[in-house]
């Protein structure tokens, strides 16, 4: 079970439709990437990287991905989350980040 942090709860809005991509790796770690359109039509992205015990290693929320469709933002988010998990990008110590 994932232990959601503040960034996820800032993202969460049950009134907005979102698409999601979940992956469970062989070591038990996982990624959760979600995209949606805001009420004003902006493409928004959430990505979470979680340790095998469910603790958030990284959670990021992008309020706007200018010029990107939901599909393109999803691909970018999945690639970024995989890179964070595999060491292609350094995982920051603080699990919470929000992007403007």
Image (spheres, helix red, strand yellow):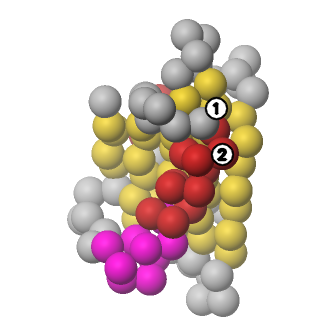
Dot 2: element:
helix
Above or below, 42 relative to 87? above
The magenta span reads 81-89
Q: Is residue 43 left or right of residue 96?
A: right
Earlier residue among tags 1 and 2: 1
Q: Are marks 1 and 2 in contact (CB under 8 Å)?
A: no
Pick the quarter of the image with the C terminus: top left
Q: Is residue 81 left or right of residue 21?
A: left
Task: Determine the residue located farthest toward the bottom in the rendered image.
Answer: 26
Does the magenta segment cover residue 6?
no
Question: What residue is disc 1 on?
Answer: 36
Dot 1: element:
strand
Q: Residue at x 58, y 16 (%)?
A: 41
Q: Is residue 97 left or right of residue 83?
A: left
Foreground label between 1 and 2: 2
Where does the image place residue 31, in percent across and percent down from the top left? 58, 65
Where does the image place residue 72, in percent across and percent down from the top left? 58, 47
Q: Mark 1, residues whose alpha carbon is within 10 Å: few (<14), some, or many (≥20)?
A: many
Q: Mark 2, residues whose alpha carbon is within 10 Å: few (<14), some, or many (≥20)?
A: few
Where does the image place residue 82, in percent across and percent down from the top left? 51, 72
The quarter holding residue 78 reads bottom right
Residue closest to the eye, 3 or 34: 34
Which numbered marker is on residue 27? none
Task: Determine the residue located farthest toward the top in the rendered image.
Answer: 40
Residue closest to the eye, 64 or 9: 64
Question: How many numbered discs sit on the rendered protein?
Answer: 2
Where does the image place residue 63, in percent across and percent down from the top left? 43, 29
Which numbered marker is on residue 71? 2
Q: Residue at x 60, y 36 (%)?
A: 69
């Amino acid at each position: 079970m994932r232990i959601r942090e503040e960034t996820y709860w800032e993202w969460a809005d049950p009134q907005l439709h979102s698409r999601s991509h979940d992956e469970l790796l062989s070591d038990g770690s996982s990624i959760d990437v979600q995209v949606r359109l805001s009420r004003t039509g902006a493409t928004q992205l959430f990505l979470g990287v979680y340790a095998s015990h469910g603790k958030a290693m990284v959670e990021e929320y992008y309020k706007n991905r200018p010029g990107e469709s939901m599909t393109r933002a999803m691909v970018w988010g999945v690639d970024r989350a995989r890179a964070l998990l595999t060491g292609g990008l350094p995982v920051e110590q603080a699990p919470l980040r929000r992007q403007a």
